[in-house]
Amino acid sequence: MITLTENAVLELKALLQRKGASDTAGLRLGVQRGGCAGLQYTMQVAERCEEDQTIEQDDVRVFLAPDSLDYLRGCHIDYSHDLSDSGFKIVNPNAARSCGCGTSFEAKEEGVEPGYDSALDGTNCS
């Protein structure tokens, strides 16, 4: 369902250690309305909520919020060490397009081809 790169696993392990998280904590990933493209990712170090789906890979856990599963199915999580934009990056096959900042996206609609939207070129990211 969701995969993590080696960089993402290493950074998540380091993050959990820095935060002093318990052995059962992980990265809770969800999607909510907002951002400059309509939907935005939420991420937090947390314990598993009862309804969450859990993905385990290389001794780290990602908890998926149940109301976000359709948006997250098939995602690939990486960690980038860019000078100006380090952090977890989500490659989402369910996104018709993403904002220039990479933290928000527009969901694909079956049979609809997304057009260019200048609001999503990265100049309006907050």
Image (cartoon, rainbow, N blue to C red):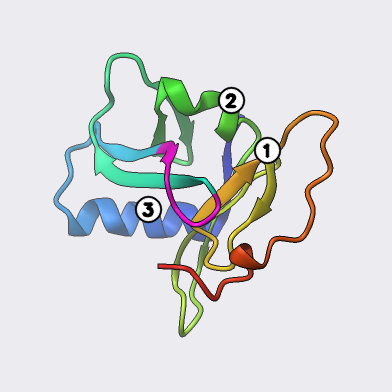
Q: Which residue is mark 3?
A: 12
Mark 3 and mark 2 lie on one chain; the one further toward the N terminus is 3
Question: Residues in magenta?
Answer: 30-37
Percent coordinates x, y for residue 57 in the rendering = 49, 37
Q: Nearer the viewer, mark 1 or mark 3?
A: 1
Secondary-structure class at tag 2: helix
Residue 36 lies in magenta, yes or no? yes
Mark 1 and mark 3 lie on one chain; the one further toward the N terminus is 3
Instruction: Say whether marks 1 and 2 touch (CB < 8 Å).
Output: yes
Q: Taking 70 as reference, is 28 left or right? A: left
Residue at x-position 29% and y-position 57%: 15
* Disc sitting over residue 6 in the figure: none
Quadrant occupied by the N terminus: top right
Instruction: Decide which of 89, 98 is in the foreground and name it.
Output: 98
Amino acid under label 1?
Asn
Q: Which residue is mark 2?
A: 70
